Amino acid sequence: MIRPLTLLGLLALAALIPAAGGASSSRVAVNSVTFTDSTGEDPNGPDITSVVVSNDDTGLISFQINVPNQNSLTGDKLYDIDIDADNNPATGDPDPLDPGADYAIELFQGIANLFQWDGKTFSRSASGPSQATLVYTNAQTGPIIKISNVEVGNTKQFKFNVLAVSNITSDASGNPDFTKAHVDFAPDLGHGFWSYQVKTAPLRLLATKFREVPSRPKAGRLFSVRMVAVRSDTGAALQGGAVTCTARIGGKPLTVRLHRIANKEAQCAWLIPAPARGKTVRGSIVVTFEGLRVTKTFSAVIR
């Protein structure tokens, strides 16, 4: 890990980077933003052309760092993403490179780590943030780093920058040596941070795998309807919640014999009266969870 150490040597490297030809730009797509960086600052260094940031409905954020000239993730390379999770430059790291950064993601030598500003440095203390969702892959144009917004302050809108370094060596003590390193900042130094808004669809409950048991209700027997309710964000089936069951025959309500969720399946059951053969039973099953509800109705002729 390099992040807990001082990176002031990169400031000296930054002074050697030629001035960029113009400000970086961004292109917006649905739940995704492509941030374009200037190119050609250092012909020998990694050249970030763009960073594509997106998120899914669970709040999982993806940073696709495109470095086509040095796309392979060799051991001499380091990637760093600084995140100002609260959009407040007065909190977090006061360093002029990343003023206000509250979190930092470092990818180096096959290991991704999340650090949090503790008032003095970026640390990974026992009381620090979880990084359970932090993963990375090496795509054809560079690394893709993913992390849940929950683990970076449950942020809904944040500012960030990206740093790519190559040709990192080791000194006699085995510590990282940046003497011959090449670096690229995105956006370019002096252009501040990029800004990204985490957009997620409102959580809904969806009904799946609805069935009637038996497939046709029979007079004098128990009849049940069963449904799996899932979350729209994760697709996970609910294991808890309130189940409301209603059924009528000719306008007369039936007494509910069973209403529960068991084995991730909502269940309702009624006893069909013996004289009801040939009549129609109509009703619904409703699952309510954290103020949300999903309903499935049914209608069947009794045999």
Image: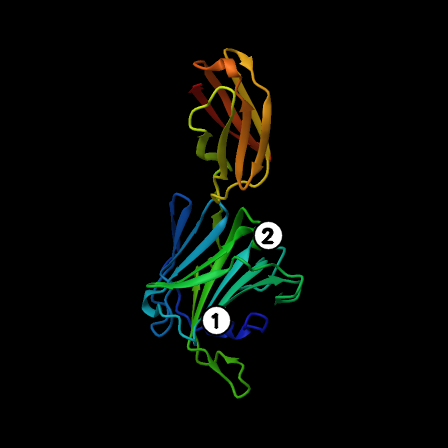
Disc nearer the start of the sequence (1/2): 1
- Vertical relation: 215 (above or below) 95: above
- According to the picture, the residue beneath numbered tag 2 turns out to be 153
- Vertical relation: 148 (above or below) 213: below
Farthest bottom residue in view: 172
Q: How far across and down, in percent of the image, does residue 112 sit?
A: 50, 66
Answer whether residue 56 is visible to the viewer in this image: yes
Q: Closer to the camera, 277 or 61?
A: 277
Q: How far across and down, in percent of the image, does residue 74 sit?
A: 40, 74
Helix, strand or loop at mark 2: loop
Helix, strand or loop at mark 1: strand
CA–CA distance between discs 1 and 2?
Answer: 23 Å
The disc at residue 168 is: none
Answer whether residue 99 is visible to the viewer in this image: no
Task: Tell me if mark 2 has few (under 14), some (14-19) or many (20+) residues whose alpha carbon lies within 10 angstroms of its own.
Answer: some
**What residue is rendered at 49% in x and 51% in y?**
60
Q: Closer to the camera, 94 or 20?
A: 94
As shown in the figure, which amino acid type bears the numbered disc 1? Phe
**What residue is rendered at 50% in x and 36% in y?**
229
- According to the picture, the residue beneath numbered tag 1 turns out to be 108
Using the rendered view, name the quadrant where residue 128 is placed: bottom right
Q: Closer to the camera, 180 or 285?
A: 285
